[in-house]
Amino acid sequence: MMYPFLTMDDDTEITHSEMREDGSVKVYIETPDEKDGFHDVTCLLPQYRWLDVHGYSKEELEHFGEIVRNNAHLILEFSQKGGVLNAANL
């Protein structure tokens, strides 16, 4: 199951999985692109291991890395509570 976390102004979506038995959480980032369809990347927390980069530049990955680092504590918490909407009782 993937839970929504953030939608950015350029329609980039950041979602995350529930926490796995090993304590890891999959963060998936996807941006629509007129030419390629979508650009996407996966990051595993808490290791900050980036996997399967498709279409993003080094600068874009650095930007997403900053967003993930700044919000990792929230993503890890929400991954144990069924996502942000469930954690907020919405």
Image (spheres, rainbow, N blue to C red):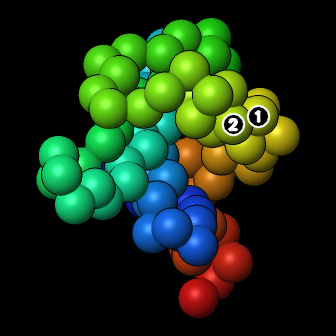
Residue at the spot of label 1: 66
In this rendering, the answer to whether 55 lies above or below 36 is above
- Residue 84 vs 74, above or below: the answer is below
Q: Look at label 2 and name its amino acid.
A: His
> In the rendered image, is residue 83 in sight?
no
Element under disc 2: helix
For mark 2, what is the residue? Answer: 63
- Left or right, 66 with respect to 19, comes to right
Query: Residue 55 location in percent, x, y?
Result: 32, 32
Residue 8 visible in the picture: yes
Q: Amino acid at mark 1?
A: Glu
Residue depicted at x 46% and y 59%: 12
Which one is nearer the viewer's eye here, 59 or 80? Answer: 59
Relative to the observer, which residue lies in front, 3 or 41? 41
Q: Is residue 23 above or below residue 71?
A: above
Kindly indicate the quadrant of the structure image that contains residue 86: bottom right
Q: CA distance from mark 2 to mark 1?
A: 5 Å
Q: Where residue 61 sits: x, y (%)?
A: 57, 28
Q: In which quadrant will I find the C terminus?
A: bottom right
